[in-house]
Amino acid sequence: MDGRSQEILLQLNRIFRDVFDDDGLQVTCETTAKDIEEWDSVEHIALVIAIEKAFKVRLNAAEVGKLQNVGGIVELLMERSKP
């Protein structure tokens, strides 16, 4: 994992902690919705909105639907933030 992807993962950790209101939450690239009890469809929408706001991107339903884990979010954000 390079510096940029680590930076994105750190920022995602802050977003996840805020959305799920859990200061002890620690996500990794392998984390999935099954790993976080509160990660339901409503929280998923809140999470996507928070990510879009923080990274100043718009994610479409097809992109979001293909994501398997937090690592997929990192990869998508890396792709979207290319110059």
Image (cartoon, helix red, strand yellow):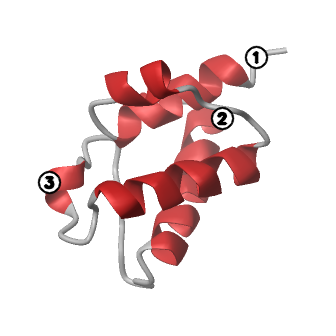
Q: Which mark is residue 34?
A: 3
Badge 3 or badge 1: first in the primary sequence: 3
Indicate which disc, 3 or 2, sits on the residue closer to the N terminus: 2
Q: Amino acid at mark 1?
A: Lys
Q: CA distance from mark 3 to mark 1?
A: 30 Å
Q: Nearer the viewer, mark 3 or mark 1?
A: 3
Q: Position of residue 54 (x, y in %)?
A: 73, 53
Graded by Cα atoms within 10 Å as few (under 14), some (14 to 19) or many (20 or more), the crowding at tag 3 reads few
Residue at 38% of width from left, 35% of height from top?
71
Which residue carries the number 2 mark? 4
For residue 21, what is the image quadrant?
bottom left
Residue contact between numbered discs 3 and 2, judged by CB atoms under 8 Å: no
Name the residue type under label 3.
Lys
| 77 or 50, nearer to the observer | 50
Report whether 35 appears left or right of 14: left
Residue 28, disc: none
Picture quarter containing residue 42? Answer: bottom left
On residue 82, which mark appears?
A: 1
Q: Secondary structure at mark 3?
A: helix
Residue 1 seen in this snapshot = no
- Depth check, mark 2 against mark 1: the one in front is 1
Q: Which residue sits at x=53%, y=48%?
A: 48
Q: What crowding class fits label 2: few (fewer than 14 Cα within 10 Å), some (14-19), or many (20 or more)?
A: few
* Cβ atoms at labels 3 and 1 below 8 Å apart: no
| Quadrant location, the C terminus | top right
